[in-house]
Amino acid sequence: MSTLTKATGEAAARETPARRRRRMDRLPYLLLLPCLAIIGVLLLWPLGQVVTMSFYKLDSVRQLRGDREWPWVGLANYAQILGDPFFRTVLRNTVLFAVANVVLTMILGTLVGLLLNRLGKKMATFVASCVMLAWATPALTGTIVWKWIFDDTSGLVTWLFNKLPDGLSTAVFGRSDWTGYGWFNDPLLFFAILTLVVVWHSFPFIAVSVLAGLKSVPSELQEAARVDGAGPWRVFWSVTFPMLRPVFGILVVLSTIWDFKVFTQQFVLAGGTQDRSTFMLSIYSYAEAFSPPPKYGLGSSIAVILTLILLVVTGVYVRMVLRQEDES
């Protein structure tokens, strides 16, 4: 027997079960190291840069390149933003928009998921494929299409309203000629169109996720509820919904995060950052950072505030899930 083989055998003999168990317990963390390294480079480092920039007064590209010194201002950027009445307006717009979109997206997605679950296999596959086209469409492309639909001269909606009888259109809406009507000029109407675009793009993911959850619900429980005389609504709330509560919880958190961060759709529909009455936190951060004169420090502080809000929302959900697991 060679010396190497003999040494290997002696090392294996000396390894105790406890030592072997500790070595195996460290293996999953070692396997996660490459993924953690990628996350650190692509996510944590840029986030750290944004947090760092929020403590400085940065108003030129030369400062960002390092050609000039970064003036330290501490929490002055946060104090300026939080003390600005316009920030409270923007925060209100963001919260109301997110709540409305999360509710509408969850309701529509759940209804479509229930529909897909009741369809046959071939029809469900066809409908799900058609629905997922909206989810697969890039946000920029889909928003451009919706902006054309509401174009004030050649848009589909303008054409449809012009086809209404003049008497009916005048009696209901107060005008008969809709050519040149600015659909995006009124803030309330703008948010209604923006909600339509965001919900259209978001509900397919909810529908497919709910459908996947419904496939895991034992059909025997639903059948037993129907035998006891429960209707479809009662079966859903008493049997299906309790079993899918973790799925709905995750979908609500994801939808909240996505709707709080809506930027592309709003930027395209509004045509930039000129209309401050429709600002939300994401576009407010962009406008402060890049609109002349640029204020990168203020924009970074708004981005950090938005991140903290989303972390609070996620933390509340995680705490609720852990509490439910402890109670069960």
Image (cartoon, rainbow, N blue to C red):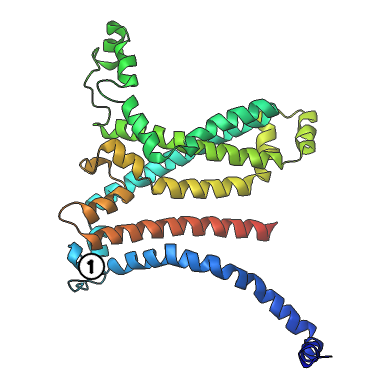
Give the residue at x 38% y 42%.
96
Furthest residue in direction left, as rendered: 293
Q: Position of residue 43 (x, y in %)?
A: 43, 62
Q: Is residue 106 above or below residue 68?
A: above
Q: Amino acid at mark 1?
A: Arg
Q: Is residue 269 above or below residue 257?
A: above
Residue 316 vs residue 154: left or right?
right
Which of the image's four quarters has the C terminus?
bottom right
Give whichever of 23, 168 is nearer the camera: 23
Disc 1 crowd rating (10 Å Cα; few below 14, some 14-19, many 20+) is few
Q: Position of residue 213 (x, y in %)?
A: 66, 42
Give the residue at x 31% y 16%.
159
Which residue corresponds to mark 1? 65
Give the residue at x 18% y 71%.
67
Which of the image's four quarters has the N terminus?
bottom right
Q: Is residue 180 above or below residue 53?
A: above
Give whichever of 71, 325 is nearer the camera: 71
Decide if residue 48 is in sight here. yes
**Total numbered circles:** 1
Instruction: Give the secondary structure at mark 1.
Output: helix
Decide if residue 108 is in sight here. no
Furthest residue in direction front, as rendered: 2
Give the residue at x 64% y 56%.
324
Residue 144 vs residue 224: left or right?
left
Residue 21 vs residue 262: left or right?
right
Q: Position of residue 308 (x, y in %)?
A: 40, 60
